Each structure stands twice: as C-alpha cells, then as structure tokens.
C-alpha cells in the first residue's frame, strides 16, 4: 500500500469492502481472514494470490 501511495480508505474502496474489513485483514491477530479477501487485496495491489498444498 505504501509503495502505491494507497491509504486504508482508498484501498478499501478499490476492494469494494469497508475500511473495518481492511483493518481486519491488516491485523495479524485477527483469524477471520478469508482467501477471497486476501485475493481481493492482492488484485488491488497488482499481485496474484497463489495457494499451494504440499505433502508433509
């Protein structure tokens, strides 16, 4: 966000979500994060989310 000069309000608008939802995303102690929210944030930042399951 800092590299693209995005504040929380602008980022939330681009994600089509609330600033409160973005705050939850950015809170490392909040476990309610969904992959959909993370993918949306990545897309706004010009990134792609890649989830991979590996054998233990």
Image (spheres, helix red, strand yellow):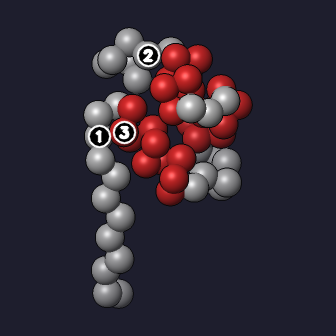
Question: In this figure, which residue is indicated by the disc labeled 3?
Answer: 43
Q: Which is nearer the eye, 38 or 56?
A: 38
Compared across the picture, whether 5 is left or right of 7 comes to left
Residue 36 in the image, given as x and y percentages of width and height? 51, 53
Residue at disc 1, secondary structure: loop
Question: In this figure, which residue is indicated by the disc labeled 1?
Answer: 47
Residue 21 in the image, given as x and y percentages of width and height? 66, 36
Compared across the picture, whether 53 is left or right of 18 comes to left
CA neighbours of label 2 inside 10 A, class few (<14), some (14 to 19), many (20+): some
Q: Is residue 9 above or below residue 24?
A: above
Residue at disc 3, secondary structure: helix
Per the rendering, the mark at residue 27 is none
Q: Is residue 36 above or below residue 14?
A: below
Kindly report the distance in space between the C-alpha atoms of the residues bearing marks 3 and 1: 5 Å
Question: Which quadrant of the structure image shows residue 18?
Answer: top right
CA neighbours of label 3 inside 10 A, class few (<14), some (14 to 19), many (20+): some
């Amino acid at each position: 966000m800092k590299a693209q000069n995005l504040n929380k309000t602008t980022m939330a608008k681009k994600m089509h979500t609330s600033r409160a939802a973005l705050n939850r995303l950015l809170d490392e102690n909040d476990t309610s994060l969904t992959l959909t929210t993370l993918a949306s944030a990545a897309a706004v930042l010009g990134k792609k989310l890649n989830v991979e399951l590996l054998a233990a």
